[in-house]
Image (cartoon, helix red, strand yellow):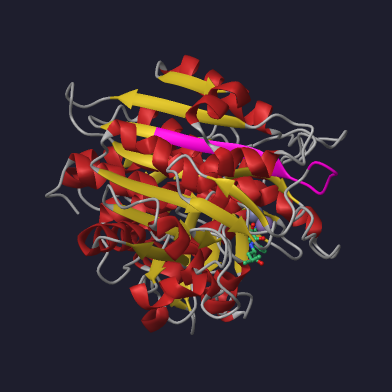
Amino acid sequence: MTDKNLEFSVKSGDPEKQRSACLVAGVFEGRKLSSAARRLDEASNGALGAILRRGDLEGKSGQSLLLHNLPGVLCERLLLIGCGKEKEFHENRYRETLAKAAKALQDTGAGDATLYLTELEVRGRDIRWKLRQAVETVEDALYRFDRLKSEKTERRRPLRKLILPVAKRSDLAAGEEAIKQGKAIAAGMSLAKDLGNLPGNICTPAYLAEQAIELGKQYNFKTTVLEQADMEKLGMGALLSVARGSRQPPKLIVLEYHGGHEGEAPIALIGKGLTFDAGGISIKPAANMDEMKYDMCGGASVLGAFKALAQLQLPINVVGVIPSSENLPDGNANKPGDIVTSMSGQTIEILNTDAEGRLILCDALTYTERYHPAAVVDMATLTGACVIALGSHPSGLLSNHDALARELINAGKYAWDRAWQLPLWDDYQKQLDSNFADIANIGGREGGAITAACFLARFAKKFKWAHLDIAGTAWKGGKEKGATGRPVPLLVTFLLQRCQPHAE
Ligand code: BES
Ligand code: MN
Ligand code: ZN
């Protein structure tokens, strides 16, 4: 959960005249002062420079130094943040510096602060970008998930207000808008993180469906939940087969947001909502299996994107479809070799019950045809192979339409939630040949992320479609374990750009 009370505002003005509880300014390596720090040094008659010469802050990335009562400066605290080499100050460094500042601020008693880090130059990025990123990065750094701990991390004097300065008064309007977008994206990410971090015994398909209904009530859009019987009538034999091994009934969650013109073709967002993936009969090894509670992060990103888009009241029509189930071993579960019939009529030989994501997604794709969407994007923690191919920095992107792929890649670059395209060539399709059915659900070890997408592509022939494999990006393992809220920033940026096709 993020602190609901964290408020952002934009302001133009000189640092030495600010009255907030803490000023934050950057220092580059070699004790090179940023322009705000230089002004403070001048206002204090060189006191700042003198302190730095004592050697307490070299300006290396990750360093910070809290000073009190600098002479000539109205503000009682000054937090200096090391920014690393000025020449290397690009997007990642900007974001790391802000995250460091947010965490350091939280450890002070300051209830509000003015962040002069937004003045730092990031090549190719304007004030709008810097402010939106500042909001998202700070909210991300301050996110915590302690809902299930008996002792909450309450702070005696929590940070309540952050002021983001801009250089010129003429930047104020753009700044306000950037903050609004940043807040909405951060709220969507926070929802996606909460749902991802919740364990499988709480976040079940029914729980996801309830959350979707709640969200729809809160923001006044329509939510429908298709139950097992509804899916049987539709012939969703692939999706239903995955749920056979579970005591939790599957759900197909459908969200409809109407912000655009009546009758305008919607964008469809489909998200894998597998609330726990044990692999089924083709069971996974025990190590780190707990992380398979994150197998619903694609679905959570649809809910997060809807939250943001509804908060921003975007003038666009969007449909969300979240197929949700567990994948567990059981006497009634899918077995290797089983053949099921999908809603599209194509028969599928299930050679590995652990390749279940594509089984629930293929029926969701076919279901989406009824909306005649302008474009379809699915998000899924689909393959370990994608993590081997790309690691955890970009999401994998595969598409049957190059212009749509480019649009998403650009949205990801702007959002700093990047995707990298892999080839969806027909050459790979024969790896999915089955001896006994129309298609097999696995294609061997080679190009595993691609063959998974090739499987989906057979169900996405009726529309422009792109698939984001978020297996490497939706959560972090290791010490800082937790959901990331990705790819909510990419999705919301994509939708924003669809609303104003000529803006960035
Ligand atoms: N949810 C997993 C993919 C996954 C695995 C994501 C590990 C992140 C980390 C998916 O359902 C799965 O099990 N995929 C299999 C496919 C294989 C059987 C073809 C995989 O990647 O091993
Ligand atoms: Mn699996
Ligand atoms: Zn899975």
Horizontal side of 10 relative to 447 (left or right) equals left
In x, y percent, where is residue 491? Answer: 38, 47
**Looking at this view, is 358 or 160 the one in front?**
358
In x, y percent, where is residue 247? Answer: 79, 32
- Magenta-tinted stretch: 320-332
In x, y percent, where is residue 119? Answer: 33, 59
**Looking at this view, is 211 or 273 the one in front?**
273
Horizontal side of 139 relative to 130 (left or right) equals right
**Which residue is found at the position 32% from the left and 68% from the top?**
122
Horizontal side of 158 relative to 284 (left or right) equals left
Vertical arrangement, residue 163 with respect to residue 347, above or below: above
Vertical arrangement, residue 312 with respect to residue 168, above or below: above
Residue 231: quadrant of the picture: top right
The C terminus, quarter of image: bottom left
Q: Main secondary structure of the magenta part?
A: strand
* In the image, residue 347 lies in the stretch drawn in magenta: no
Q: Is residue 77 visible?
A: no
